[in-house]
Structure formats: C-alpha cells, structure tokens
Amino acid sequence: MKQAIQINKHMYWVGVHDFNCRHFHGNMFPIEEGTTYNAYLIIDKEITVIDTVEAEFMDIMLERIHSVIGDQKVDNIIVQHAEPDHSGGFMRFMNEYPNAKPYASNAGVQIMLKQYFKDYEYHKVKTLDEISTGDFTLTFIEMPLIHWPDNMMTYVKEAHVLFSNDAFGQHIAGYDLYDDKCGLTKCLAKAKEYYANIVMPYSDRVEKKLNDIAALQLPIQMIAPSHGIIWRTYIKELLEAYMDFATMKAENKVVIVYESIWKHTQDMAEALAEGIGQSGVSVKVFKESQTSGALIMSELLDAKALLVGSGCYNNEPASNISGFLSKLSTCHIKGKKALGFGSYGWFRNTTAQINERLSACGFELLSDQILAQNYTPSTDDLANLTKLGTEIANIIKSED
Ligand code: FEO
C-alpha cells in the first residue's frame, strides 16, 4: 500500500509519481526524469485535500490518503486548477468522499462543469476569501492565467504554508521531496525550464502577482506546488529567480536556433557563433530538430538575443522552424533582440520572412541586413558572418 509523506505536523503529501512521463502537454514539453502530480492532505477538525491527480493515478492517491485517515471522511476538497493533471481524479475522489465540499474559483467551477458535465455544488471562492477547518484558516489567492484562467493558490495562515499549484512547479520526480534534498542549482534550473515552457506567455501577470503576494507580507515557511519538489529552504532564492523569469532578465548570451539539410545554414550558424563566442559573449547553438524544445526555451528565457536560421523550403522556412516561431509568437517576448539567417537556392524570401516573424513576436532586429546566402557560403562569406557575430557580441555587451 502506498503511504502518504508527512510534510509538517498536520499536513501530508498524497501525490503521485509519473516516472515514465517524457512529454508533458502532449509533445510540446519534453522532460527528462518524469514528474509528480502533487496533492496534499491537511488534518484538522475538518479534513481537507488540496487538488487531485491525473485520473490514471487516482488509486495511488486514495491509498496515500487512507494511509493517514483510514476510514475517516474528507470534509473539503480544494480544486486549485481544473487542468486534468490536477482534476482528472476529482470525480473518483467525489465517489469516495461524496460529502466533501468542493471549493474552486469562479473560472474553475465553469471549467470543471465543461470538462466533467456534473455539478458537484461547488463553493466559489475569490482572492482573500477564507475558510476555517478548525485550527487552520485557508486563504485563497486567485492567479488567473498562471496557467489557465482558473488557477488559484491556497495559503494556510497558521502554518505559513502556501499551496501554489502550477506556480513554482518543476518536473522533478523522486522521493527527495524538498529543495534542500535536491540542491538549489537543480531546483532553480528545473523551475526555470518549467517557467520557460509553461508560464512564459503570462509573464506580465506573474510579475504583478509576485508584487501582489509581496504586498500581502505573508510569512511563508513552505511553498508546496503541484509538480516537483516542495520549497522550504530556498524560498528567497526562488522568489528572486521568479521575478527574473517574469521580467525576462537577460545575461550576455545569444541563442542560435537553426535547421539545415545540406549544412549551408549550419555553417552560417557556426560562423556567427564563432564571432560571438570569441568576443566573450556566451553562445548556444542548437539544430532545432536534434534539440529538446524545452532546453531551447529555457536557454532563451535569459538570453539577450536569438538568431534563427533556416534553409529555404519552397520559399518557406523549415516546418519545425516555422513551428518554433509560432511558439515564440505566444510568449510576449520583452527586451530581446533577434535576427534571421539562412541559405537558399532559387527562392530567397525565407530570411526576410523569419525577420518579419521575429519582429511580430516582439524582438528588436539586430540589423537591417538580410542574411540570405545563395547556396554554399564561401570562405569569405563565412568570414563576414564571423565579423557580424563579433558586431552582435559588441551590441550585446554595450547593453551592460
Ligand atoms: Fe499542472 Fe496547468 O497544470
């Protein structure tokens, strides 16, 4: 029988591991070590559960709850987010605990009804609404569009615990449940990857919500998200990092993403990288089709500039580069520069199209030049690209 894990005197982790998950959100977010769907149990005069898990793992969650409360009943279920990774097991939960009172945001109730077609007489809550479970007070804080319209957090005033749902999550799967067990570097890197791939399009809202939470001056001893580890030691570092993510604070770094069949565009990418890297600016070079999209987005989050290259495929960029540009178009990019490049044969509009799409994504173009190379770059062409790389590095460094 699967057991709950106690996280403080009155609270337990009753979540599940999805060790085999390698693609989160369909194939949009490749992940390496699986993930967790975290749910929590609060023992008080009234017993409360925070969130459920994906439907297929619900047996395990129920086993973990039973390991603590046996045959006792659950009084409250807080639906912090209707996305199925946290609500898929909800109806099964309600079959098990039909008298539990479900709480959700207004948007959460609407989505639950549209997803599961059954009205469980939800109690709608909004920011700063409170319920008492006996000794504990649960305060709700809505965070719409971090990541769906319905997300909310739940703060337990007397225990200084913030159940943060998707916010501050990361895809780490293990039994080392805490940040200090996993190490700060890994935890922040995974939080950054999660942010870049899930939350980045909503950065303005994240910045505002972080300021709102700071203004509430809540003492926080533990942040318990719905994916990955629980933060208890590095909360200050996490909140500072999240503000950097939300404002897209950038380092002296350029990310080059390209696609190439006959190596001409690849040679252009590598000539540009030579000039950038030799000038003391960090540069990452990724052939899109051979690189995890999660890694590319994570590296882009704190880069000052992005160079996007593609060969010409019937006067269009490669379809995966087009897809990458489509993804960027949702990200509300702030304060970053960019430029397209690529080799072509008989149609030559691809680079101009890339530049146009980069501009539409919010990037400022680094140059008016159209870096369109007809067939194979010569030694002189490559030398010119390396020189341009040096100039790009100087622009990057001049912003310090
Ligand atoms: Fe982890 Fe937006 O769900």
Image: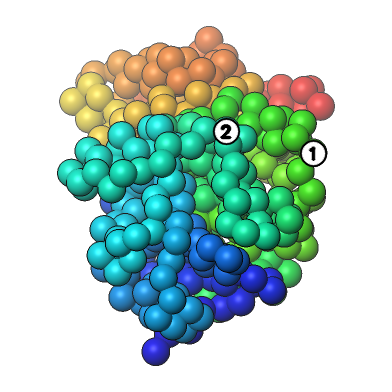
Q: Position of residue 184 (x, y in %)?
A: 72, 62
Q: Position of residue 52 (x, y in %)?
A: 39, 60
Numbered badge on residue 217: 1
Q: Amino acid at mark 2?
A: Thr
The foreground one among 265 and 6 is 6
The foreground one among 182 and 355 is 182
Q: Is residue 220 left or right of residue 321?
A: right
* SS state under label 2: loop
Image-quadrant location for residue 251:
top right
Residue 20 position (above or below residue 213): below
Instruction: Give the residue at mark 2.
Output: 127
Indicate the quadrant containing the N terminus: top left, top right, bottom left or bottom right: bottom left
Q: Position of residue 25 (x, y in %)?
A: 34, 50
Q: Earlier in the sequence, mark 2 or mark 1?
A: 2
Q: Amino acid at mark 1?
A: Gln
The foreground one among 257 and 95 is 95
Q: Are marks 2 and 1 in contact (CB under 8 Å)?
A: no
Mark 1 crowd level (few <14, some 14–19, many ≥20, 10 Å Cα): few
In the image, what residue occupies the spot 69% across and 30% down?
A: 212
Residue 107 position (above or below residue 166): above
Q: Is residue 116 left or right of residue 25?
A: left
Q: Is residue 226 left or right of residue 186?
A: left
Does ligand 1 reach within 8 Å of label 1's beta carbon? Answer: no
Q: CA distance from mark 2 to mark 1?
A: 15 Å
